[in-house]
């Protein structure tokens, strides 16, 4: 049983990774560039040190006895003046060299931190608030004009080539925001706001995840950053601001009724309907999302059906209520939610 669930977990991870990028050493933005440069510097320097240390170790272990056998016992324990001085020099030299290397690493590391913190900080408009919840991400596009404020979940759309301020908050415990292709980790701390700037140089879908243990489903707190050319981003944003389209077929109309007459509305909001719950992800454009359950599974009708019927099997411990949806209502409900593009 345990083997099977392990295999399933591995499959889930593989399937959710497929086609998306999540790599520290494949930077897609200036912040990640600096971090990757630091990483490679550490890597090659430490590889060189490792090889040198191993070479010395092998040499000491395999070299001939230096004629120690022939020396009188006394001499072996009391090295000559000359030998003593030589040894002292070697040890001092090695210590100084170690300190210099550590200092170089420190300077490079502090320099990278400073350079990264100075990137962004440009006042050109896009600020996104990301709120951590057990176990999903709320994403809110901030704007001084309330009609331009957009609430979304588990996906962040950004325009390519523009710095974006990410404001991080938490509703419960400490989480950590980490999209390796774009930036390092930044904690989300309850009752505090932390920030970081991200910027994507090229279009792509960058996978990120919570990087601070935050409870049972910490590993299933996944988000995607979707970087698009400015025009495409703007078009997406304007569409996403619209309320959900009214269901147009009898089956999706019925699905909407199922949704509105069930407990779904206490936690989820669908703009354009009476559903206005704030505890769970906003579902206004649910059908256009890549994944469900904070990207634990791809967003397919089959997965959605399984998730609605038995969320505790898909993601044990999560806070979604199990609602009794009968078999005639399930398909209309799935069709309705998937129609919310
Ligand atoms: Cu949220 Cu780990």
Image: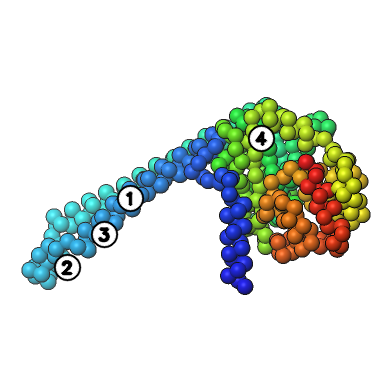
Is residue 75 shown above or below 288? Answer: below
Name the residue nearer the viewer: 336 or 328: 328
Q: Relative to 147, is 123 on the left or the right?
A: left
Q: Mark 1 sits on what residue?
A: 49
Q: Mark 2 — residue?
A: 77
Residue 300 or residue 52, whichever sits in front: 300
Rounded to the nearest whole Å, what is the CA distance between mark 3 and mark 1? 12 Å
Q: Is residue 18 left or right of residue 293?
A: left
Label 1 – label 4 distance at C-alpha: 41 Å
Looking at the image, residue 18 lies above or below residue 204: below
Is mark 4 in CB contact (under 8 Å) with mark 2? no
Mark 2 CB lies closer than 8 A to ligand 1 = no
Quadrant (top left/top right/bottom left/bottom right) for the N terminus: bottom right
Q: Within 10 angstroms of label 2, few (less than 14), some, or many (20 or more) residues?
A: few
Secondary structure at numbered mark 1: helix
Is label 2 or label 1 in front? Answer: 1
Q: Which residue, given by chain and number where applicable, does mark 3 sit on?
A: 57
Label 2 to label 1, Cα distance in Å? Answer: 31 Å
Q: Is residue 225 toward the left or the right of residue 329 in the image? A: left
Mark before the other along the chain sequence, 3 or 4:
3
**Marks 3 and 2: CB-CB under 8 Å?**
no
Residue pictured at 17% horizontal, 61% vertical: 63
Q: Earlier in the sequence, mark 4 or mark 2?
A: 2
Q: In the rendered view, does 201 fall on the left or right side of 330?
A: left
In this rendering, which labeled residue sits more in front, label 3 or label 2?
3
Give the SS element for disc 3.
helix
**Earlier sequence position, callout 2 versus callout 1:** 1
- Label 4 sits on residue: 158
């Amino acid at each position: 049983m345990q083997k099977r669930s392990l295999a399933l977990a591995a499959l889930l991870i593989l399937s959710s990774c497929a086609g998306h990028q999540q790599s520290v050493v494949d930077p897609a933005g200036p912040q990640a560039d600096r971090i990757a440069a630091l990483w490679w510097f550490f890597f090659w320097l430490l590889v060189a040190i490792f090889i040198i240390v191993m070479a010395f170790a092998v040499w000491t272990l395999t070299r001939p006895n230096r004629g120690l056998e022939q020396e009188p016992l006394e001499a072996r324990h009391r090295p000559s003046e000359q030998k003593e001085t030589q040894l002292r020099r070697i040890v001092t030299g090695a210590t100084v060299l170690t300190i210099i290397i550590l200092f170089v690493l420190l300077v490079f590391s502090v320099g990278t931190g400073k350079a990264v913190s100075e990137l962004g900080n440009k006042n050109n408009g896009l600020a996104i608030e990301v709120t951590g919840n057990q176990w999903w991400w709320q994403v809110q596009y901030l704007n001084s004009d309330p009609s331009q404020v957009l609430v979304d979940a588990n996906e962040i759309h950004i325009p390519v080539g523009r710095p974006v301020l990410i404001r991080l908050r938490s509703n419960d415990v400490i989480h950590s925001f980490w999209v390796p292709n774009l930036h390092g980790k930044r904690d989300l701390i309850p009752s505090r706001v932390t920030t970081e700037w991200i910027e994507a140089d090229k279009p792509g879908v960058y996978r990120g995840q919570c990087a601070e243990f935050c409870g049972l489903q910490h590993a299933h707190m996944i988000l995607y950053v979707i970087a698009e050319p400015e025009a495409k981003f703007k078009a997406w944003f304007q569409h996403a601001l619209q309320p959900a389209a009214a269901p147009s077929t009898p089956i999706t109309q019925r699905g909407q009724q199922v949704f509105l007459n069930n407990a779904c509305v206490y936690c989820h909001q669908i703009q354009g309907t009476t559903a206005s719950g704030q505890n769970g992800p906003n579902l206004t454009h649910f059908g256009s999302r890549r994944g469900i359950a904070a990207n634990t599974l791809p967003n397919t009708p089959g997965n959605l059906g399984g998730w609605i019927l038995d969320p505790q099997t898909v993601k044990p411990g999560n806070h979604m209520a199990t609602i009794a949806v009968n078999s005639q209502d399930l398909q209309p409900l799935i069709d309705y939610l998937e129609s919310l593009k």
